[in-house]
Image (cartoon, coloured by chain):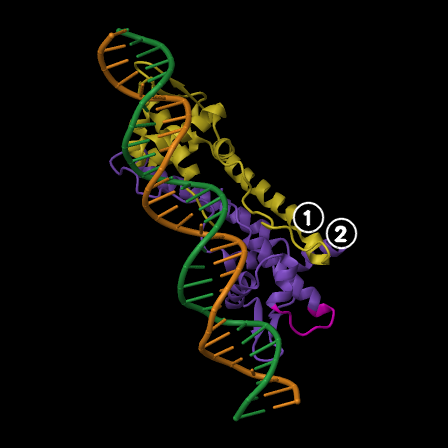
Chain colours: A yellow, B purple, C green, D orange
DNA sequence: ATTTGATGTAACTATTATTGTTACATCGAC
DNA sequence: GTCGATGTAACAATAATAGTTACATCAAAT
């Protein structure tokens, strides 16, 4: 599976903003976040743009620009983050349609779709059970 | 998420072999399977090679060569298939290690790992609940 | 022993997604 | 107007999946 780190980076960024705000700052810059994440600021801005469209973060422009949370950490689950940045399913069906003349080729798509739907539902349930507040608590506990 | 169709193709191939054997044939060729799947026989052979190493399928060489199941369809779950072909995790941590000087950068990895482990476990539970016999039943029902 | 039909596997290409990077227009507080 | 940051386009680098060709190898059948 081509696992990707988008959920990790997005959760990291939001958690960082949340802690930074909790320490009294108004906004966090993509540069600051990128330093903690160890990546390029544009990667952060791109991800935060998607999180912004989903209503999880907001940006301010001009002088004193930067990012802030649109909701409290406790009101953001990992499922919210996941859905904001991962539109596609975990498992794909055939790239090219299988032989419709074959019994298996004809029926395997719907049969697997039912299973895959169940898997996605389970995955979402798990992600929904953890908020970024939970994540931050774990992070601070480890420190 | 770069969803891939490896699980779909692998389940399709094994189910096809199972039905073919149930109809009285000894072995199925990668060419026959590839026709049903609508792909290249080498793609099938590569996947079946991995399924063979996992003890789900066996091949015979020489004249009258081809593939057969190593276990009955009822004794193969989608989790068995998944584990045979997908070694990696669904979610990855940071590609480059985050800033260890930062509280969040230091603690976010372990915190997310705990969540990701739970997600993987849920995913496995779901996949383990369906056998290829279940899949074949669905396939035949739809015909 | 030779023939034969399929596997096993290397090698290469095409496609796609993620990630990293540079560059620059734009915004808005000061 | 200045200044520091966002918004976003454009491109390169990396990696995984998938498709394809080619060919050595194997073992049953003749």
Q: Give the dominant element type of the magenta stretch: helix, strand or loop.
A: loop
* Quadrant of the rendering where the C terminus of chain A is positioned: top left
Q: Which residue is mark 1?
A: A110
Q: Is residue B69 left or right of residue A70?
A: right
Residue A44 quadrant: top left
Where residue B82 sits in the image (x, y, percent)? Answer: 54, 56
| SS category of the residue bearing label 1 | helix
Q: Residues within 10 Å of mark 1 (few under 14, many from 20)?
A: some
Task: Please check the rendered image and state whether residue A113 is part of the magenta-colored stretch, yes or no.
Answer: no
* Total numbered labels placed on residues in the image: 2
Residue that mark 2 sits on: B142
Chain containing mark 1: A
Discs 2, 1 touching: Cβ within 8 Å:
yes
In the rendered image, the vertical position of residue A139 relative to residue A55, given as above or below: below
The image position of residue A47, as x and y in percent, is 41, 31
Residue B22 in the magenta stretch? The answer is yes
Magenta range is B21-29
Q: Position of residue B94 (x, y in %)?
A: 36, 42
Cα separation, mark 2 vs mark 1, equals: 9 Å
Which corner quadrant of the image does residue B44 belong to?
bottom right
Please give the label number shown on residue A38.
Answer: none
Q: Chain of mark 2?
A: B
Q: Residue at x 70, y 73 (%)?
A: B25
Is residue B74 visible from the viewing direction of this image?
no
């Amino acid at each position: 599976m081509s696992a990707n780190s988008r959920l990790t980076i997005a959760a990291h960024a939001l958690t960082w903003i949340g802690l930074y705000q909790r320490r009294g700052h108004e906004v966090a810059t993509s540069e600051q976040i990128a330093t903690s994440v160890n990546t390029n600021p544009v990667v952060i801005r791109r991800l935060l743009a998607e999180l912004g469209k989903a209503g999880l973060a907001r940006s301010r422009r001009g002088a004193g620009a930067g990012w802030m949370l649109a909701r409290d950490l406790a009101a953001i689950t990992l499922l919210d983050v996941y859905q904001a940045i991962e539109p596609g399913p975990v498992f794909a069906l055939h790239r090219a349609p299988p032989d419709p003349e074959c019994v298996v080729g004809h029926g395997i798509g719907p049969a697997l779709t039912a299973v895959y739907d169940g898997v996605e539902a389970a995955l979402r349930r798990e992600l929904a059970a953890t908020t970024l507040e939970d994540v931050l608590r774990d992070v601070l506990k480890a420190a």
